[in-house]
Structures are given as C-alpha cells and as structure tokens.
Image (spheres, helix red, strand yellow):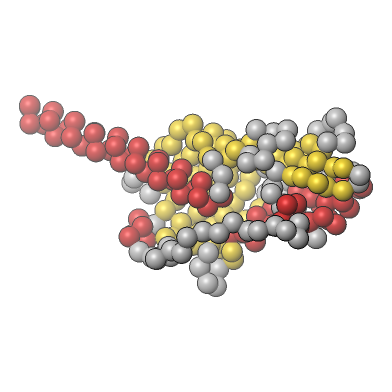
Amino acid sequence: MKKFIVVFFIILSLLIFNKIIISQIIIFTASKLVDRSISIKSIDIDYSKKQIILNSVEVENINKIYYKNIFEADRIKIKYNFRSLFNNLIIIDYLIFYNSNIFLDIDINNGVISNDNLDEVKKLDVNYEPKTYPTKKKDTNFLILKVETNNTQGFIKTSNKSNEIKINLSNMNFSKVGNKTGSQHYKQVFKFIFADFFFKVPDINLRNLIKKTYKM
C-alpha cells in the first residue's frame, strides 16, 4: 500500500510539474511570436486527447493609449501532434478562438493618424529602423492545419471622438497556417482579420483614413 501511495504521488507530481512547464513554454513562445506580454488565467491539458485549452488570455498593448490590451479571448483550444514536438516542424491539428476581442487605439491629429497600438504608423516614418533579432542557429517551423475564430468583436477608440466603436467580426476559417514554406503565413492571416475589422467600420471618414494610412 505504501509503495502504491509513493508511486501515486510521484506520478501526480510529474503531471503537475509537466503542466507548469508546458504552461510556461506556451506563454514564452506565444509572447515571442507576437512580441508582446501575454497572460493566461489557467491552462487545462488533456494528455489523452493531445489537447490544451487556454482560459482568459490577454495580450497587452505595448503602446498603451486607451486600452490595456490589444487582444483578449475567453478560450483558445489547441490540439497538438505529439510526435512533431521533437521535430523541426511542429504540427498543430487545430487552433480555435472563442469569444475574442480586438482593441485598436488611434490618435488622430490634423486629419492624420499619428499613432496607434499596432505599431504600424511609426513604420511609415522615413527614419524608422526595424527591430533586429539575433541570428538563429536553427529555425523551428510550425504548421497549423486548421485555424478558426468564433464570436470575435472589435473595438476602436480614437482621440478625436469620445464614443467607442464596437464591431461584430466575421467567423473565419483558415487552413495550413504557419511559417513553413508553402503554408499561408500567419502574418497574412492577421491581415485578413484586421481587414475584416477595418472594412466594417461604420464611420466612412474613419474607414477611408484607415485605408489610406495602412494602404489597404
């Protein structure tokens, strides 16, 4: 009986610590991917289903003007390919977002967008110098076979108006998304989502200004 108890607690400890390690790896990797701080309230891992659920996810704004975060999601569901975790190409079977919010801060001066929380306006400056990253000894590619968004809402706050604009975004599905050659690059997926956001802005003047600034 004592041996059983000892074995039970060893297995339980391994599972708990594995969950902590996996949680930290997910947060670190996601933060590096989007180049922003990420907080996750809790993470549920089902080893038998090879499934991870991230609960109450928040991606912080770097350039905070009005909103604390640039993105929030009630839940993100991930199914991973276990064998691929040990290869150069990590395969995710699906990545599903539930009840997400996207927040856009816009400063407008003299009819021109002068600042935003996407860090895109500053890239239009002729003196802008892009961030440089150290050369990687080995690249790790990833491929997500299915990406799905459900019940996503967008919020816009501009400096020249007091009211907040709320927009219901389209539910979207993408296949074979990643950074691997031949896949749909994940940055392109971001562009599709933000295009859906921008083209639904009800204020025609603001919509035209956004199109002009971001060259959409």
Which residue occupies 88% across, 36% down?
A: 160
Q: Which residue lies furthest to the left in this view?
A: 2
Residue 114 locus on image (x, y percent): 81, 46
Residue for point 82% across, 55% down? 213
**Is residue 145 visible in this depiction of the protein?**
no
Q: Nearer the viewer, residue 91 or 37?
A: 37
Q: Can residue 16 be seen in this view?
A: yes
Residue 58 picture location, percent across and down: 57, 37
Q: Quadrant of residue 130?
A: bottom right
Q: Is residue 194 above or below residue 21?
A: below
Residue 192 x %, y %: 70, 57
The one of 159 and 156 positioned closer to us in this rendering: 159
Residue depicted at x 42% and y 53%: 80
Residue placed farthest to the front in the image? 127
Position of the C terminus by quadrant: bottom right
In x, y percent, where is residue 78? 47, 48
